[in-house]
């Protein structure tokens, strides 16, 4: 997990940073080194109580280790601790953030979007829906049943009506239901999910754009999870078409702390029309007096924000530009191929019944059993038994009717089925798929009564 080269790179970068302040009178903050050493050792011991997120045998939740350059750049920035709310608090890091936004905008075909980094996808989606509510006050926000649950919560916070739209058997938003609601005339914004967190499904963005334009409705693309996959060569044709239409969305959210190789928290919100910045205007002369340039706090609902996040993202995008055919794109291709390979292995198994063929790098699979409840029990047993073999998976609940689209002989004795879910978001997963599948086969028949631990 620890590469000594990272420590050496950080030390050299810190020495260079220190030369920028060499003209100041000597001053070194003091602290009790021995006491701090004892506390840090206890911290290290406590932090051992985590899953090995960095390892390819962690194939559970959406927890991608940040790249070494992001870790180092973030740590380096902490010696300054910039605040990207106002230029006084983070001159260099604010400039870096603006450059990052330009590059992220170009990823979606936007030359000069309005945007900024956020603490994560939730805050980024909140800002997008806040602007939507200002443009269409009192009108409904609609999103699919597989969209992230934060959309309904955010709508409640903003005092906007929200409605959940059914999905089809692929986990995508149902277009007929959307069309019926739009005819009612009280919808202001459609949320299109570009990579659902459950199934990794990509909503049919071209059709949603057409419907929205016909009815004068905004389209917000929640690409928090899948936003980087437009760089890849391995997308299927349906998903590829959706990514090609992102330029026509009104706002986009992407999380660099997922496939952008960043530490938590680093989300991003982008608006196609920079004029929506008028909604952010507020008076704070003591904060913004130092410069006539745009302060990022003037286009953000958040105030204090870590400049270190911008520094880390800037360094990463310098090393791995957001270009098709580049190294980052190749890593994303490996993630997609990993999911496809695991899905194929599971499809040949008698112990598991995979759901939809993966569009991104998420594989969902039910445990083979005669009934929905028995399948759920078996999935929980596999989850625990796999963990005993250091293979860490995730569990996720799905409507039984959706699961029966892929497992038609499953008796529906419960409303939901607990399925196993693997997010193969490390490029190294491609080299570990066979081992993961072998462990899954080995634990498939573990007796249920032995599964009292790890639930």
Image (tube, rainbow, N blue to C red):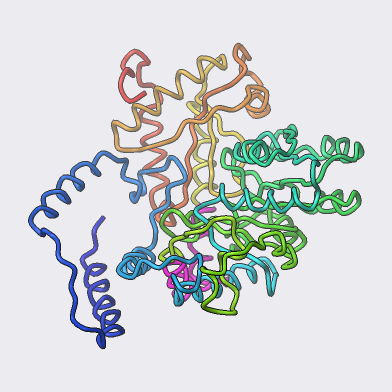
- Please say if 349 is above or below 43: above
Residue 4, percent across and down? Answer: 20, 66
- Please say if 359 is above or below 406: below
User: Which quadrant does the C terminus fall into?
Assistant: top left
Q: Residue 331 versus residue 289: which sits nearer the camera?
A: 289
Q: Which residue is drawn at 76% across and 46% down?
A: 190
Left or right for 451, reference 124? left
Give the quarter of the image for residue 242: bottom right
Magenta residues, start to end: 310-337
Give the quarter of the image for residue 103: bottom right
Q: Residue at x 67, y 23 (%)?
A: 401
Residue 163, percent across and down? Answer: 74, 33
Left or right for 274, reference 6? right
Residue 91, percent across and down? Answer: 46, 76
Give the quarter of the image for residue 115: bottom right
Q: Residue 62 versus residue 380: which sits nearer the camera?
A: 62
Q: Residue 347 versus residue 237: which sits nearer the camera?
A: 237
Left or right for 139, reference 48? right
Outermost residue toward the front in this view: 286
Q: Residue 337 versus residue 96: which sits nearer the camera?
A: 96
Q: Is residue 321 magenta?
A: yes
Residue 336, percent across and down? Answer: 54, 53
Q: Does the magenta stretch include residue 403?
A: no
User: Which quadrant does the N terminus fall into?
Assistant: bottom left
Is the stretch drawn in magenta largely helix, strand or loop?
A: helix
Outermost residue toward the bottom in this view: 23
- Please say if 410 is above or below 151: above
């Amino acid at each position: 997990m620890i590469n000594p080269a990272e420590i050496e790179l950080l030390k050299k970068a810190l020495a260079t940073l220190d030369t920028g302040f060499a003209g100041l009178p000597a001053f070194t903050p003091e602290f009790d080194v021995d006491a701090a050493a004892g506390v840090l050792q206890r911290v290290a011991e406590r932090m051992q109580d985590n899953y090995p997120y960095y390892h390819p045998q962690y194939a559970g939740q959406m927890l991608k280790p940040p790249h070494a350059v992001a870790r180092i750049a973030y740590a380096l920035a902490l010696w300054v601790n910039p605040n990207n709310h106002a230029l006084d608090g983070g001159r260099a890091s604010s400039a870096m953030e603006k450059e990052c936004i330009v590059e992220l905008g170009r990823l979606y075909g936007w030359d000069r979007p309005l945007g900024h980094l956020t603490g994560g996808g939730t805050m980024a989606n909140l800002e997008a829906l806040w602007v939507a509510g200002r443009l269409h006050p009192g009108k409904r926000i609609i999103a699919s049943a597989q969209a992230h649950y934060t959309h309904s919560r955010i709508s409640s916070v903003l005092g906007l009506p929200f409605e959940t739209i059914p999905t089809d058997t692929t986990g995508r938003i149902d277009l007929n239901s959307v069309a019926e609601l739009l005819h009612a005339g009280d919808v202001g914004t459609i949320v299109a999910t570009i990579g659902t967190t459950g199934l990794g499904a990509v909503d049919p963005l071209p059709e949603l754009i057409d419907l929205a334009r016909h009815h004068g409705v905004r389209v917000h693309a929640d690409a928090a999870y899948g936003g980087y996959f437009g760089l890849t060569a391995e997308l299927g044709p349906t998903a590829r078409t959706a990514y090609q239409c992102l330029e026509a969305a009104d706002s986009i959210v992407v999380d660099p702390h997922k496939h952008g190789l960043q530490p938590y928290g680093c989300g991003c919100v982008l608006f196609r029309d920079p004029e929506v910045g008028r909604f952010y205007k507020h008076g704070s002369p003591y904060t913004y007096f130092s410069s006539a340039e745009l302060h990022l706090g003037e286009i953000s609902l958040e105030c204090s924000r870590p400049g270190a996040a911008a520094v880390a993202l800037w360094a990463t995008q310098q090393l791995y530009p957001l270009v098709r055919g580049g190294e980052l794109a190749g890593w994303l291709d490996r993630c997609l191929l990993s999911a496809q390979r695991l899905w194929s292995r599971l499809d040949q198994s008698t112990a598991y019944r995979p759901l939809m063929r993966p569009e991104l790098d998420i594989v969902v699979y039910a445990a083979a059993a005669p009934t929905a409840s028995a399948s759920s029990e078996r999935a929980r047993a596999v989850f625990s038994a796999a963990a005993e073999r250091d293979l860490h998976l995730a569990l996720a609940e799905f409507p039984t009717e959706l699961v029966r689209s892929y497992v038609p002989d499953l008796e529906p004795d419960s409303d939901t089925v607990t399925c196993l879910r693997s997010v193969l978001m490390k490029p190294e997963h491609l080299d570990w798929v066979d081992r993961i599948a072998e462990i899954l086969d080995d634990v498939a028949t573990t007796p249920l009564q032995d599964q009292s631990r790890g639930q």
